[in-house]
Amino acid sequence: MRITIPFTLPTSRADGTALAATEVAAVDFFLSTDNGLNYASVGHAAPDQTAFTVDLTDPGTYLFRAETVDTQIPPRSSVDSNVVSFTVPTPPLAAPSPPVLGAVGMV
Amino acid sequence: MNLKSMTGLILIALLWVLPAAQAQTAAPCPPLSACLSWAAPTSNTDGSPLTTLAGYTVSYGQAADALVKTAVINSPTTLGYTVSALTPGTWYFTIDAFNTAGAHSAKSNTVSKVIPASVPAPPTNLAISANLTAYTLIKAQGKLALVPVGTIHAGVRCDATQSVIIGSTAYYPVAEADVTYTGTVTTVTPLAQCS
């Protein structure tokens, strides 16, 4: 399943000064599969993109958050964005096969 | 008054560059600041001992040839100074010493420091949407097959065609409910949830 995570690129820095789009190197995305205890990098979006996409296959709850990374050397990252989550449901169980009757005995 | 001029200072470091053993106890230089340290001169330019040292003048600016800001340190024993409230960009620093008669030494070497810009703000308005594929279950050549018919926004439970959407997968009505399918389509569920 392809999940789309739209986001809004910031236009300022933490101190309130302006942040041009050309000063943004990427938006890094992080994924947690343990209800937010641990996050791991899952990819990044370019600053000219408005959304990040990721494919999920296994059932479970996925939490995502993002950080802005600027073009300074060394680059500096923002604090974490808001967290969004998505649950891939467990497929319903297939119906059981019918029982197989044996021969009916003759009395 | 025949003043003796002093030897030029040597600005030994821009930051608190200390040996590893000492670095653990040194306070870090605050953000938007440059922490200068230097070695005091001990003689005048004529070689005589310097006994009338009165202080230092730190000059700094955002171009090496335009050190337009100054800070005066009226203490000969002070060997460090923190220039604070610097704006992002490259800053250049130099220092001279002056004696009790007001005579200044030549400028020291020039050092520089890049003050990084603040961290960017985080991205906002993160949301989740899933381009879910809706299928209809059809019978073809004696078997049932799932045929994609479009996309459905995440979170929708039932759409106008009375399909059922459970989580991520849309299930459309099965026209021939009495057909038993034993192929690979295993995710079709009953449709009673959509009324």
Image: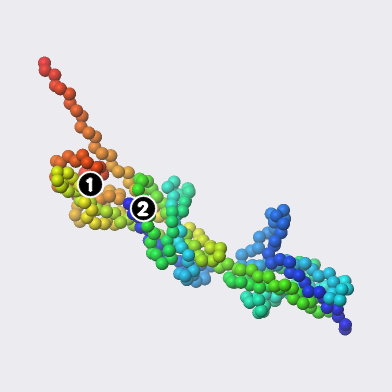
Residue B92 percent across, percent down from the top left: 66, 73
* Whole-number angstrom distance, CA of label 2 to CA of label 1: 27 Å
Instruction: Give the residue drawn at x 70%, y 75%.
Output: B59
Q: Which mark is residue A55?
A: 2
Indicate the quadrant containing the C terminus of chain A: top left, top right, bottom left or bottom right: top left
Q: Nearer the viewer, residue B57 or B41?
A: B41
Quarter of the image where one finds residue A59: top left
Looking at the image, residue B82 sits to the left or right of residue A55; the answer is right
Say which chain tag 1 marks: B
Q: How many numbered dots are placed on residues in this image?
A: 2
| Residue at 87% from the left image edge and 71% from the top image edge | B49
Identify which residue, A77 or A54, lies in the foreground. A54
According to the picture, the residue beneath numbered tag 1 turns out to be B193
Q: Secondary structure at mark 2?
A: strand
Q: Position of residue B157 (x, y in %)?
A: 26, 52
On the image, the x and y values in percent for residue A17 come to 52, 71
* Colouring scheme applied when the structure was drawn: rainbow
Q: Nearer the viewer, residue B115 or B138?
A: B138
Residue at (46%, 53%) from the top-left corner?
Answer: A41
User: Residue B30's quadrant in the figure?
Assistant: bottom right
**What residue occupies the far top of the structure in this picture?**
A107
Q: Label 1 amino acid?
A: Gln
